[in-house]
Structures are given as C-alpha cells and as structure tokens.
Image (tube, rainbow, N blue to C red):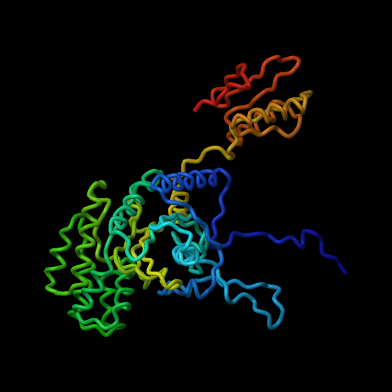
Amino acid sequence: MSSKTDKDTIYKPRPISGFLEWLPEVRLVEQGWLDDIRSAFESYGFCSIETPSVEEVDVLSAKGGDADKEIYGLRRLAAEPGEDDGGRLALHYDLTVPMARYVAQHFGDLVFPFKRYQMQRCWRGERPQDGRLREFYQCDIDVVDMDEVSLIFDAELPAMTLDVLSRLPIGPVRLHISNRKILQGFYEGLGVQDIVGAIRIADKMDKIGEDGVFKALVEDLKMDTIAARKCVDLAKIKTDDTSFMEQVRAFGIDNTVLEAGLEELAFVMLELGHVEKGLVVADLSIARGFDYYTGTVYEAKLVDYPDFPSVCAGGRYDNLVGSYSHHKLPGVGISIGFSRIFSKLAKEGKLELGAKCPTQVMVACLPGASHADVAATARRLRERGLRVERYHEERSLKAQMKYASRKGIPYVWFPANADQPNHEVKNMTTGEQAAADIDAWTPQG
C-alpha cells in the first residue's frame, strides 16, 4: 500500500475570475494613480472617509434596482447548527449606500455641506468580462447637504472628475450628462404607467440598442408603438450645447417636471462651458438604472475605447440618506471606476512600468564589510527621507549589482571603510560612481 507524498497533497493555485492581482511593478503604478487621485480630491477640499467592507443586507437593499441580485452575502463557515451564519451581513456593492448610512449615523458630528471622498474596494457577483470585475476599487466623491444641495455642485463634480482623470495617462474622457426629470416628465406626458420600468429599459440603450429598447417598451411594458418610438427618439438626442432643449420641446409635451429637468441640465451644461469642446455631452440616453437618482445623472467613457463600458457614473439623489434618517439630506455624487480603467490600460499594454520596488538607494554589503556600518549608513539615509534597503548578505559585487539592476534600483551606495575613506554612490543608469556626502547627497530626477 503506497502512501501519499508531499507532492500529492500540493494544491496548485489558479487565478480567480474577476479578481485582480498585480506584479510589484504594476502595483507601484496603481498606487501612484491612487495617490494622484487622492491628492486631486483633497485639492478641492473633499475629506476622506472609510466605511467597513461589510454592511447589513437591509442597508444595501435600500439602493433599489437589481443590486440585491449581485450582493455577496457573508457567512461563517464554522457556524453551528441553528446558529445565525451571517445572512444579515454582506460585502458592500458600491460606496454610495455605505456613505449614506455613514452620514445618517454621524449626522450630529458632520459639517454640511458634507464633501467626502472614498477610495475602497467593492464586490459584485456578476459575470466577469472585459471591464466587469467581481472585486474592484472605486473612487467616489459626494456632496450631501441639509434640505437642499446647490445645483452648482451638479456642475462642479463633473468638472472636478474630468480634472482628476486628466492627471492620469489614460487618454481623453468624454462625460455624458442627462437629467432624470427629463425622462420622468416626458414619460408622464406620454401617459406611461410604469415610469421606473421605462427608465430601466431606456438605461440599456448602449447594451441592446434602439431596436432592443423599442421592442422592450412595447412587449414588456405594453406601450403603444407611437409612444415607444418617441421614447427612443428622445434617447437619441445628443448635443454639446443647450440645443437639446429645443429638440425636446419640439415633441410638444407640456409637463412641469420635464421643463424643470431641461432647465437644470442647461444650467449644468453652461457651467461646464470651460471644458474642452466635445468632452461634455448632453446625452438623453443616459438614465442610470438605480431608483434613487432624481435629477442630474452622469456617465463617462474612454474616448479611445468607445465600446468599453462606462468608467464613471453618478448623479443627484434626494432621498437616499433619508432611508436611514428622518432628516432630509439630499446629495450628488460621482464614482470613478478605478479598477475598470486601470485593468483596461494594463490589458492594452498602455501602462508606463518602471522599477519593481520603491527603493531609491541600495546600500551594498561587500565581502569583509562591517554590517554595523552598512546598517548605520542605511539608517542615516532613511532619516533624511530616502527610501533605502540594505543588501542582506556579503556577496560579490556582480551579484549585488545584478540584484539592484533587476529591481530597477537607481543608486547603489558603498559605505566608507578602512580602504575607502569616503562614501561612494553609483548611478545605475549612467554607470558613474563618485564620492558622496551622506548628509547632503540627493538623488537626481
């Protein structure tokens, strides 16, 4: 009878679909992008919050739409029979609902308008494909205020988002803007009964096309063909100025909600007049499928990849925070799909990769060197704010140079010793080596 060997019991790991994992040199780029976004958010006066990865299912379900179908529930594998195995809790699906819960719970301690940014991982149980992941970073900005949020923020947030993204090497981003009141009022004027259902169908225009939307409105909502055709024609309106107003009014639908939506969208478009021509579009096919949006809505796309899913989305909501509080706390926000953008650029080979580590200086440890001197040299350089690692053992100069080169470390430091009275530093790019003052030397570039 043969026994199993260690080899027989080894489990060969494999990638998990929809979950990203980067090599160090890619992760360094990712961290740099996140730092740039964080800095940009703070330059506009937004403050950072972080909520737990886990929320109550009832909190997450308040979002409406089909979010509950993609929520990852949380349970304890070792739960005893009859014990609550965690069906009450789930991983958050996005950062908007957790933010709303946070504002409701900390209402008395916040200053309004509350301007927050949040950069965390989220989880969705959807089928992984290009641009759709099960675990991903989102970078959100929201403004929440008491009773009413100034319409100024509806324009400031998209301008800020375009500014933030322009700081990253991702190419141009085009922002598509609409207003849910336009759809609400238009459908009311047509006598549509299931307005929420019609909005959800209209939101699928980029997925199923004009014919698909028309067919769904007629077959699923039993809408007459004339009304359905008008809904499709409305969604086809796209302008880079306020001329959408005349096109919508030409339908001849008299509705106060529709008119309010047109005026609000015109205000936002005029406020964004400073943005480069063509990068902001009034697009009446944008609906956003979640129930809580009540006014301005946004979606943004990478211009260089027009068939790729939206990389930013958001809008105005009047009652989301009200789901957890008696206070009226409306808000407006935009979410940047960071991992969607980053993974696309990585897949296309567009990332500018550099070193495999953050080290600026490696302190060499040549045969016969004093380990105390090597350690003291590394400590002093770190005290001066440099990122430093010391080589871990006495090995040949060739071996240590190879290690530094493979990791992309730009400088190698040789501590002073009995045979070499001065510290010396080697520039790994140019090959030059020269004496250096440990208390004054700084890396170039």
Count of marks overlaid on the render: 0
Give the residue furthest to the right: 1
Front residue of 365 and 296: 296
Q: Is residue 81 left or right of residue 151?
A: right
Q: Is residue 336 visible?
A: no
Q: Quick check: 269 above or below 185?
A: above
Q: Note whether 338 is above or below 79 in the view shown.
A: above
In the displayed image of the protein, which residue is found farthest to the bottom? 222
Q: Residue at x 71, y 82 (%)?
A: 81
Return the residue nearer the eye: 222 or 71.
71
Query: Toward the viewer: 150 or 71?
Result: 150
Residue at the front extreme, as displayed: 108
Pinpoint residue 314: horizontal percent, then vertical percent. 36, 62
**Which residue is pictured at 74% across the width and 18% down the height?**
417
Q: Quadrant of residue 382?
A: top right
Q: Locate the N terminus by quadrant.
A: bottom right
In the image, taking residue 54 as reference, residue 172 lies left or right, namely left
Residue 272 visible in the picture: yes
Identify which residue, 114 or 234, lies in the foreground.
114
Which residue corresponds to the image point at 25% horizontal and 61% vertical from the top-left?
283
> Where residue 335 sits: x, y (%)?
41, 58
Query: Which percent across, then down, holds residue 228?
Result: 22, 78
Q: Position of residue 147 (x, y in %)?
A: 34, 66
